[in-house]
Image (cartoon, coloured by chain):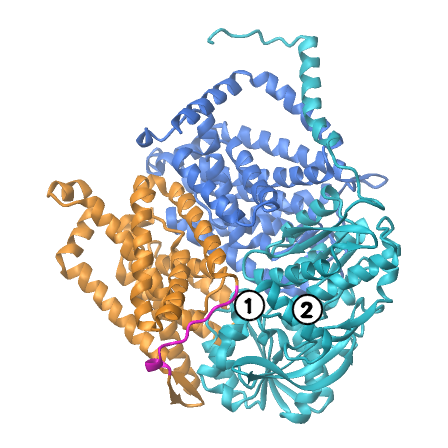
Chain colours: A orange, B cyan, C blue
Amino acid sequence: MENFLIQLLNGLVAGMLLFIMAAGLSLIFGQMNVINLSHGAFYLLGGYVGLSAVRQLGSFWLALIVAPLVVGAIGFVIEKFLLRRLYGGQRHLEQVLLTFGLALVASDLIQWNWGAFVESVAPPALLSGQVPLYTIQFPIYRLALIVFGLALALLLWLFLDRTRIGAIVRAGVTNAEMVSGLGINVHLVFAGVFAVGTALAALAGVIGAPITALYPGLDFEILILTIVVVVVGGLGTLKGAFWGALLIGMADTFGKAYIPQFSLFLIFAVMAVVLLLRPSGLFGLEAWSR
Amino acid sequence: MNRKKSLTVTRRDFLKLAGGTTAALAMPAVLSACGAGASGPLRIGVLLPYSDIYAVLGESITDAMRMYFDEVGNEIAGRQIEIITEDTEISPDVGLQKARKLVEQDEVAFVTGVVSSGVLVGLRDYFHETQKLLICSNAGANELSRGLKTPYIWRTSFTNWMAPWSIGAWAAQNVGTRAAISIPDYAAGENNVTGFSNSYEAAGGEVVMVQRTPFPNMGDPAPFMAELADSGADLVYTFYSGGAAVTFVQAYSDFGLAGQIPLLCAGFMVEEDVLPAQGSAALGTFSTLHWSFVLDNAENNAFKTAFRERTGRDADVFAVQGYDTARVIAEMLNEVGGDTSDTNAMIETLAGISFASPRGPFAIDTNSQAPRHNMYLREVQEVEGTLHNAIMENMGEIVDPGNDSLG
Amino acid sequence: MTAVATQLGRVGTWVNRQRQWLWAAFFIAALVFPFVARPYHLSLTIEVLVFAIFAMSLDLLLGYTGLPSFGHAAFFGLGAYVVGYIASTSPLALGLTSNLLVTVPIVMAATALVALAIGFFALRTSGITFLMITLAFAQMLFSIAIRWSSVTGGSDGLSGIPRPTLGIGPLSYAFASRESYYFLVLAFFLASWWLLRRIVNSPFGWTLRGIRENEQRLRALGYNTFRYKMAAFAISGAFAGLAGMLLVHFFRHASPENLYWTTSGQVLIMLIVGGTGTLTGPILGAAVIRLFPLLVSTYFDRWRTLQGLLFIAFVLFAPKGIVGLLRGERDEELL
């Protein structure tokens, strides 16, 4: 029983980390109908930029701000000069090739700049303690991660649902011409959304670094898992990213705890079952499954 | 441009076509370089990963090899040494094509390298059938010294069996008689289970749990910690590499197990390449390996200084293996007088090679076609402000039995 | 850049006009090749031909039927392991036979059957959902291969796979030499290309294209599109299995990598780079994707960056792939 509760907590941590990773991808996928295979690379880049920030500036908190800003700026530039040409549902294959190409370039340049060693980022001093829990100690950092994930979910929901900018973003997807007819710069909106999406990936990279470490190849590991989360949860909705992340996080954790040799199989079996029963994911919008 | 040309092909046209095509294809064949044979530069093929997670190992091995060859003026037995490196990534298929390129295109005298066991197993048949020599400087798959042994593959590194087997008896006698094992679910992981269990159980211990974690991507190791804590074991033996080595050690410490249940592992898991990232979480971890940074002998001291001067970073066990490989190559070439045309003659010299290496006394065992060297029991400690593997005990010489009798 | 594209378009037109001659040249070159080329180049060519078959099989599914599969390595790897298990002399495997008369039907039947089984579920979806379900099934097969080490050799894979033989009893020929294996692969490649071409240009093929364009309309016209998709999936899977079989007979080794999502991704990229829905596109794509890393990585450490830049360049200047370039098609918005 205690074991079960510990794993439940672990599952929450996994779910929240996945959510922070997936939120960015879901935003881009859902709001712009664009497949972004470079999401994992942005995660890794964020992590490494955060690492450098910690080393140079001495503060994890500063890294949490610097990394998303830097990577978000890069995302903005990429959207403006490259991705912008490829909107529209018929151009998914080109999006695949472009973003995959970007991912390769990013992956290689990251290794060139930071080296191929496995790197780690220490959690901030404030959060580096532990709390006794049955047979183990539970790291405070992970508990903080749960809180942060929930807070982020709330924040994003409020933004999209309750603010004017959020409404513009949502409107821009359904009818870009109308929105621009109202005098709003749709291009800027999309560029902004992409920038925020990549910034979120970078944020996930910094936050996740004390748990996942940083090394070449991590970007593609993250990418696959994140895509699974977004698709299972439901394309096009933040709610989908949240519940998808929780489901996959729990499945992964309990799989590892009880049937570790089959946890990979389990994740993909879960995905297959969900998609067969609900092709657009748990909370997806019907339109996006095409 | 819109006029339709006649579709009939006259005999002259056909001959022109055939001739032109054949000529175009024949050119590369004609331009092929002459073979190296017994004189001229001696080409050595190096198959290592230079991208992805094992890039660090590839770079370490290569840097150390080049360092040795530079030390002997890049000339052995009167012949100039030329190294040709190829990136194998972690793919056996890519490794095989690159091996073909080195052997057939670049016409190297022999090949060295190979980091991952999967690639080595994939290459085994190729070297066995082409009867070309491969001097492996890392991959430790037990099978290559046992069931898959071939006269054409020799190792200067280790077998996966060595590290786990060495620590088993000591663990049972000095730490506790109930052990939990946690390893990634693949061949090298299994090698560690059988090696450790064999000597641990022979010394009176009992393996109470074997935890096989997802391979290739373990992800967050947190779920495994509770099970280990609950196992009632006196010690945990593990083997992980790459990112998993770092995250596992960190989680082990983060979840409070580090102070409660001693952690033992195969030395690679806490080697110099991952120790900085693991940080204080690795303190107190016991391991066995055929080398340690703090090993105090003349060769190691000289080696470490030279390596640091050359590369700006600390040496690790992979660099030592690369260095020793280069030395083995040099001794082999000296024995055959630089004549690389007879592979069997080269192979015959291998068994007799022995010298003082940074890892201590080094020799190549004929039976297992792998090294005979010392194993050291080490503990991660803070040595002058940095983390290193302090040597607790020199466990003496070890050699792979060449069969599965000892795990 | 548009000037270059225009020139390439002209090349494409010229190529089209000189078709007859180029066929003749090609056949001569193909027959003479193994005797004039260096052994390493011959093995590269064999590898490209095998992946060309693999890529063409996916083109039938994606390019012609409009079904984006991210799990095609499932069939490729299945073909690899099935023939590996039947033929390998390793103690793990059966080591029964490597006779093509036996193995080819078994491999293609097995992969077609598995395709039907997977398709029964997956083909009820489309688009991104289909993409992810096919990925899921392939990853499940991968995890079985890695786990079931007593049969598949686990993470080390299955080695000891011999070259194939062909014949009955005393009239058996073993394709032991690289030259003979090249001819075998070439024969399979040409046969596959010819068969797929016939399929694609048959009424069945046109129905598939109809499904790609507008499945609803075809259903309204009374077509059982599900059956057509199942058939396409099975045929596509069978050819992918054939490619997998040919690969491991060449490398003499089957590894879990053959089932991994990176292989599925790679063949998808081959298709996009070469040009979907063209059957020639995948051949060119296979050549580019397989050869580029192998050739460039010798000279340039940062070859991955170059490869990424190449892909980006394709999207910007040749969005319909190499075939698109040769046909003179360009993205209108770039002009």
Q: Does the stretch in magenta take in A118?
A: yes
Side (left or right) of B377 relative to A260: right
Packing grade of label 1 (10 A; few <14, some 14-19, many >=20) is: some
Helix, strand or loop status at disc 1: loop
Is A67 or A6 nearer to us in this picture? A67
Residue at mark 1: B242
Is C285 on the left or on the right of A183, as rendered? Answer: right
Q: Earlier in the sequence, mark 2 or mark 1?
A: 1
What's the amino acid at mark 1?
Answer: Gly
Q: CA distance from mark 2 to mark 1?
A: 18 Å
Q: Which residues are magenta?
A: A117-128
Q: Amino acid at mark 2?
A: Val
- Identify the subunit bearing mark 2: B
Residue B45 % position (x, y): 71, 51
What's the residue at 37%, 34% (across, down)?
C213
- Determine if the magenta segment contains residue A113: no
Q: Which residue is mark 2?
A: B320
Given this view, does label 2 or label 1 mark the residue nearer the observer? 2
Q: Nearer the viewer, residue B9 or A45?
A: A45
Q: Is residue A167 visible?
A: yes
Q: Is residue A146 above or below residue C227?
A: below
Residue C114 visible from this viewpoint: no
How busy is the neighbourhood of tag 2: few (under 14 within 10 Å), some, or many (20 plus)? Answer: many
Residue B143 - label: none
